[in-house]
Amino acid sequence: MTAAAQPRSPRPLSATFRALAARDYRLWAAAALVSNLGTWMQRTAQDWLVLTQLTAHSAVALGQVTALQFAPQVLLLPLIGYVADRLDRRRLLIVTQSIMAVLALTLAVLVLTGAIRLWETYLLALLLGIVAAFDSPARGAFVADLVPPPDLANAVALNSLSFNVARACGPALGGILIGALGTGPVLLLNAVSFGAVLAALRRLRHLSVRKPARLVMVPRAFAEGLRYVAAKPEIKAALAMFFLMGAAGVVFPILISAMTVRVFHASAALYGLLMSFMAAGAVGGALFAASRAPRFPVLRWAAALLAVTGVAAAVAPGLVTFACLLPILGFAIQVFTTSANSLIQSLAEPALRARLLALMIASALGGAPIAGPLAGWIADRLGPRAAFLEVAVLAGMALVVGLRLRRAAKALAAPASSIPSERPPVAASIALAVED
């Protein structure tokens, strides 16, 4: 059954939630919400485990865990997108989600039995990163198999909304449960949450028929994706900004946990609450992006908002001021992420979609192996406030990239009399596409 032939709900839905008219997407979104809730509870528990039980409040160790978890998505880039384009995505997701459940269960058992060591946390973070490297582009591209093409951008935005609703509730719930039960039971709950996604994957009925990527050597498939990006200035621009903004997003848990423990001397429950404040802003950002068509200028003002608010958070005089700034940070980073993701997926050819998503994920996480340990090092040497300025610097650099691309686009769109004769006529129209 093709995507266009999928049954649609007769009930009217607002433009913000129109993708939920597809039954399979509703099922997938509900399961993903449960799984994302467990994932954010585990992240909170894992950060607290490393920071307070396995080390003496070492932000460097926390940064190393972050780097190990995200580095595989960059190192395996030539392979992961092609695999998701070539293989059956539902079967691939069943495999990856099952392995991730086993890894989560292993960590939970080690913590519950008191056998956990820091090196084991490093190893499990690395293994989880390897599996997630194959899971992420497949899961992102899988959405296109569940909704008609006109609803794709909305489905991507609603995915972000589901993720951020879980991010708003997960850390707070995780922090409360850590205080009441300890980290082990929280990690065990995450292992159980993978069952929701696995059950949903087996119940989907109306997957769209897609033509798998043709069988070619992996280097050639990767080069094909790069050539496609090179011909799409708007995608190149989004990926360049994603590299910097993604690094800023990755270090937030490190910086907020360091501020919580070392500046405000607060508990795990308050740490979870602060993460939820930020996630609440991200929910608003996802709703904002879901109600609008993705446009490149949105990426620039989101970067500007993150840079300004990052400086304000670094110098916040007290806990209340800091907490009030976190929703703005969450809003800015989520508007950027959702808009860039929707823009890239909307422009992508179906046969190349997973490869472009792999490039996007690699761009978003490419700075993590450097930004994570750097944030931890600065926090340990100069203090968490100084480390928080890293967010503002990264967002400011992303804004500069966006502004330079705008000036380049205007130059290409200059009057014909000022354009050298050897420049292809199509250049001006491409520039206008970037500007829009």
Image (spheres, rainbow, N blue to C red):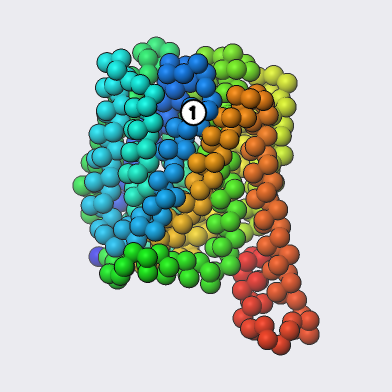
Q: Residue 302: percent from the left, percent from the top?
A: 64, 47
Query: Between 328 and 187, which is closer to the camera in this rendering?
Result: 187
Q: Residue 254: percent from the left, percent from the top?
A: 54, 29
Q: Is residue 284 above or below residue 341?
A: above
Residue 411 in which image quadrant? bottom right
Query: Between 181 and 158, which is closer to the camera in this rendering?
Result: 181
* Residue 63 visible at all: yes
Query: Between 430 and 143, which is closer to the camera in this rendering?
Result: 430
Q: Is residue 254 left or right of residue 68?
A: right
Image quadrant containing the C terminus = bottom right
Name the element at disc 1. helix
Q: Which amino acid type is marked by label 1?
A: Leu
Give the crowd class for mark 1: few <14, some 14-19, many >=20 residues within 10 Å. Answer: many
Q: Residue 202: percent from the left, percent from the top?
A: 21, 47
Q: Residue 346: percent from the left, percent from the top?
A: 48, 62
Q: Is residue 38 left or right of residue 332?
A: left
Q: Which residue matches tag 1?
A: 62
* Residue 350 visible at all: no
Query: Between 419 and 330, which is closer to the camera in this rendering?
Result: 419
Q: Residue at x 39, y 31 (%)?
A: 122
Find the residue positioned furthest to the right.
Answer: 417
Q: Is residue 138 left or right of residue 271?
A: left
Q: Is residue 414 above or below residue 345?
A: below
